[in-house]
Image: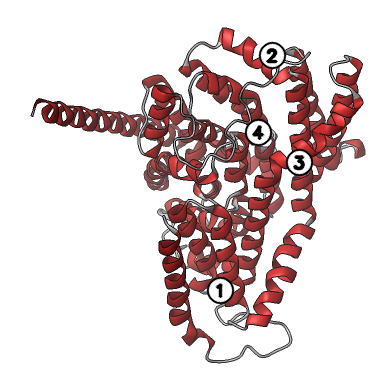
């Protein structure tokens, strides 16, 4: 898209927004505490929608998120320019960057960047790539190995995204797996696996927002009904074993296989960063030990924040943990020990270790920028009353109890997609779900539908932090990851929705889960047959034109 078209489109959006929202600002707000005139209305979800649509159209995420933020603060300030400009910083950027949870995640990102830089400089990554290349000799093997590692790292999705990407990227590159496919594999085994793992930061978050029930027991009982997470995992296995690709991902994979082009699109910000790395003095153990140390200390950091030293058991410690603080503490301790280890092995000198800090930080700058914009947009959306707006929609649908799981799933998908936060979504919706008078089994199904919908919307959203970190871990252009993943995620979402309609009727996991898996398999077989038919038709057209 050229600059003139882009400018025309942005001006048009601004004019449309102004024209359609001016009637809302006919009266002042009054009172000491500022509140937007469009508070808790449809307009509260407009800023993230603008950001998402622009990102998908322009393929440029920074300006799209910024325009979404600007539209949000204008709505919040009732189109008062000075108030809007002030709010963009005080209520937006500064508020998001001063939030302790967000700062903890940024620290973890920077520390992880330094650790990855250390492993690369020591030659551990190159040695591991050479070792794995001798044992993983097929694309399917590389995909399944990536999938397996994603399943193993179930403690936290942020940790999963960045660790799996950095460990498996050299292997998937050698097997000509596109970066978009790698990003999808990471994303589809990050949040979904954490959402069905009782010992994880996600389980802790869920148990923390459910009042009046044993949150952990409710979480465990909801696992068999968590259709989106389970079907996402099943889909990876099916499409890998049967060789199914469709949508934009198909083009990316074909370019990788036929031409060795891992990126496909002209915008390839990470190209060359993993090519021809010096082997260094390191061996495979110089990657394995740092990764193991990182995993161990991050787990210890999480259970420490959950009060394990105060007498809590492992499960209670995870349930009460502060994942952001725990990952920061654990990764920093791991970083110190890794430096001592590499120096003791005389693989790196002290000065070489220190050089890895700015290198690691620079590698994480794109993720930090996008996360900052996404958090700011989410905060501004909250000021517009999106929580109250979505809650009102949900409460209006509680009369249809049999259809409630499907309705909860759809509402959770929409909210998570537009806000980019799954935790925020189930934090808002779960208390409403458990407050509805439901029989025990329907309550479990509705809770699982809320959790599944939150993961689904988060999985699809360009402004989701896990989506951002998946593209960072895979070193893939962020919008490429979003556009190639979306058809796959929507396929699983459609099957899950049908599954929740059935679940509301039969209320039995023994029926719903096998039936949903069968539907998932059937849909993918149909997609494969259609894709094969289209390819045969295209090939016949090419042959006909050649004969003519």
Q: CA distance from mark 2 to mark 1?
A: 55 Å
Residue 391 at x, y = what percent? 55, 66
Q: Secondary structure at mark 2?
A: helix
Residue identified by numbered label 1? 40
Q: Are marks 4 and 1 in contact (CB under 8 Å)?
A: no
Mark earlier in primary sequence (2, 4) = 2
Residue 47 at x, y = what percent? 54, 66
Dot 3, crowdedness within 10 Å: few (<14), some or many (≥20)? some
Mark earlier in primary sequence (2, 1) = 1
| Residue 6 vertical placement versus 74 (above, below) | above
Which of the numbered marks, if any, corresponds to residue 160?
Answer: 4
Q: CA distance from mark 4 to mark 1?
A: 35 Å
> Left or right of 204: which side holds 330?
right
Residue identified by numbered label 2? 127
> Left or right of 277: which side holds 248?
left
Mark earlier in primary sequence (2, 3) = 2
Residue identified by numbered label 3? 361
Q: Residue at x 49, y 47 (%)?
A: 460
Dot 2, crowdedness within 10 Å: few (<14), some or many (≥20)? many
Q: CA distance from mark 3 to mark 1?
A: 39 Å
Q: In front: mark 2 or mark 4? A: 2
Relative depth, front residue between 342 and 387: 342
Q: In front: mark 3 or mark 1? A: 3
Mark earlier in primary sequence (3, 1) = 1
Q: Residue at x 62, y 73 (%)?
A: 73
Q: CA distance from mark 2 to mark 3?
A: 23 Å
Q: Secondary structure at mark 3?
A: helix
Instruction: Classify residue 493 by image quadrant.
Output: top left
Residue 317 appears in the picture as rendered: no
């Amino acid at each position: 898209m050229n600059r003139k078209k882009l400018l025309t489109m942005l001006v048009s959006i601004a004019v449309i927004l102004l024209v359609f929202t001016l009637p809302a600002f006919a009266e002042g707000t009054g009172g000491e505490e500022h509140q937007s005139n469009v508070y808790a209305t449809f307009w509260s979800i407009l800023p993230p929608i603008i950001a998402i649509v622009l990102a998908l159209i322009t393929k440029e995420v920074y300006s799209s998120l910024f325009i979404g933020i600007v539209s949000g603060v204008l709505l919040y300030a009732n189109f008062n320019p000075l108030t809007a400009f002030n709010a963009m910083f005080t209520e937006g950027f500064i508020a998001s960057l001063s939030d302790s949870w967000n700062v903890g995640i940024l620290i973890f990102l920077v520390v992880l960047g330094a650790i990855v830089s250390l492993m690369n400089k020591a030659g551990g990554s190159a040695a591991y790539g050479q070792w794995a290349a001798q044992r993983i000799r097929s694309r399917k093997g590389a995909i399944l190995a990536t999938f397996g590692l994603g399943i193993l790292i179930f403690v936290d999705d942020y940790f999963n995204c960045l660790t799996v990407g950095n460990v498996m990227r050299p292997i998937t590159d050698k097997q000509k797996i596109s970066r978009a496919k790698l990003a999808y594999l990471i994303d589809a085994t990050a949040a979904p696996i954490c959402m069905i793992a009782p010992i994880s930061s996600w389980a802790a978050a869920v148990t923390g927002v459910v009042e009046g029930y044993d949150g952990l027991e409710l979480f465990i009982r909801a696992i068999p009904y968590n259709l989106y997470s389970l079907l996402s995992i099943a889909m990876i296995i099916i499409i890998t074993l049967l060789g199914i690709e469709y949508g934009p991902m198909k083009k990316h994979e074909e370019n990788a296989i036929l031409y060795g082009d891992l990126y496909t699109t002209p915008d390839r910000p990470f190209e060359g960063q993993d090519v021809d790395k010096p082997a260094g003095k390191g061996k495979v153990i110089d990657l394995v030990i740092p990764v193991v140390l990182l995993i161990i200390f991050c787990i210890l950091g999480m259970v420490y924040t959950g009060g394990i030293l105060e007498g809590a058991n492992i499960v209670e410690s995870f349930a009460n943990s502060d994942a952001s603080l725990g990952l920061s503490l654990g990764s920093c301790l791991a970083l110190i020990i890794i430096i001592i280890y590499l120096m003791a092995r005389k693989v790196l000198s002290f000065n070489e270790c220190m050089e890895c800090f700015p290198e690691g930080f620079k590698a994480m700058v794109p993720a930090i920028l996008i996360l900052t914009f996404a958090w700011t947009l989410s905060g501004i959306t909250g000021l517009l009353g999106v929580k109250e707006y979505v809650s009102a929609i949900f409460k209006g649908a509680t009369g249809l109890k049999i259809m409630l799981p499907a309705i909860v799933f759809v509402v959770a998908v929409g909210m998570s997609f537009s806000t980019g936060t799954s935790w925020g979504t189930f934090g808002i919706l779960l208390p409403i779900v458990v407050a509805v008078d439901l029989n025990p089994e329907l309550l479990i199904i509705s809770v699982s539908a809320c959790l599944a919908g939150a993961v689904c919307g988060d999985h699809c959203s360009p402004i989701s932090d896990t989506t951002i970190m998946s593209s960072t871990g895979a070193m893939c252009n962020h919008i490429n990851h979003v556009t190639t993943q979306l058809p796959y995620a929507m396929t699983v979402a459609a099957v899950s929705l049908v599954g929740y309609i059935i679940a509301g009727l039969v209320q039995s996991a023994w029926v719903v889960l096998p039936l949903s898996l069968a539907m998932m398999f059937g849909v993918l077989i149909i997609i494969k047959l259609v894709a094969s038919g289209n390819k045969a038709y295209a090939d016949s057209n090419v042959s006909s034109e050649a004969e003519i």
